[in-house]
Amino acid sequence: MMNVIETNKSSLSSLSFKHVEFVPGIWIKGKCIWLQNCTEKVLVEEGIVFKIKHEQVHSRIRYTTIYVSNFSNGPKELKIVGMHYIPDFNHLAFVSPSDQRVFHIADDKILLVNGRCQDSFVKEYTTIPLWTARSDKIWSSLQTGILKYQPMAKGPAASILAFDLKLGAHETKKFNTWEIIGTNKNEILSMEKALMSV
């Protein structure tokens, strides 16, 4: 069923990672901060440091590691947020509850998006039109940090993953997210299984 794909006006005949954007973010104390185009970010007011490392572990797998450190003397409760999108192209992004993953379908390619924090996998997923992706419209409740659940978006679309994270004083935790490009669902799920066994 996922191999039959509607042709878009904007063609992505050779979808590659140069087309796919990833933007990490943090939700803390009722506000969301996006960390665009950086490999390290210090949020002095919050006592939080981010370090971001991108790896191309295979021609069809991109893997990102984010280290989140609490340099304050007290515990922190926050959410790590990861937004994936394919700018300037119409495509279909959807949450697959049975697979517990997000997929983007563009022409003859499928992009799988997933992540984990330490040993727990994604807690929340949603998709949203790209033009509202960095607004408060992604939240069902910005104050409590609950994403608005929208299982499917078509056109210029983004997918968002969110993890609850508790950090003790002076503690660091690791968050990973990955994108896998393939031509069918079974292929990319097999590649993900191999990635997780390494």
Image (cartoon, helix red, strand yellow):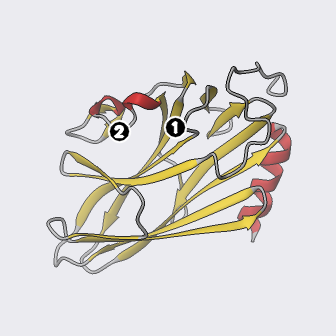
Mark seen at residue 60: none
Helix, strand or loop at mark 1: strand
Which percent across, then down, holds residue 103?
A: 66, 36
Amino acid type for the residue under numbered disc 2: Arg
Horizontal arrangement in the rendering, residue 160 relative to residue 36 (left or right): right
For disc 2, the marked residue is: 134
Specify whether residue 46 is in view.
Answer: yes
Answer few, some or many: residues within 10 Å of disc 1's Cα (few below 14, many 20 plus, some between 14 and 19).
many
Give whichever of discs 2 and 1 has the lower sequence position.
Answer: 2
Looking at the picture, how far across and down is residue 1, in whole percent?
82, 22
Residue 45 sits above or below residue 178 on the image: below
Residue 173 placed where, x, y %? 42, 71
In the image, 113 versus 54, the foreground residue is: 54
The residue beneath circle 1 is 159
At horizontal 18% and vertical 76% (from top left) the residue drawn is 72
Q: How far apart in space, not on screen, are marks 2 and 1 (Cα)?
A: 11 Å
Q: Residue at x 24, y 78 (%)?
A: 71
Kind of residue at disc 1 = Ser
Viewer-side residue, 121 vs 46: 46
Determine crowd level at label 2: few under 14, some 14-19, many 20+ residues with C-alpha closer than 10 A.
some
Q: Secondary structure at mark 2?
A: loop
Residue occupying image coordinates x 71% and y 63%: 196
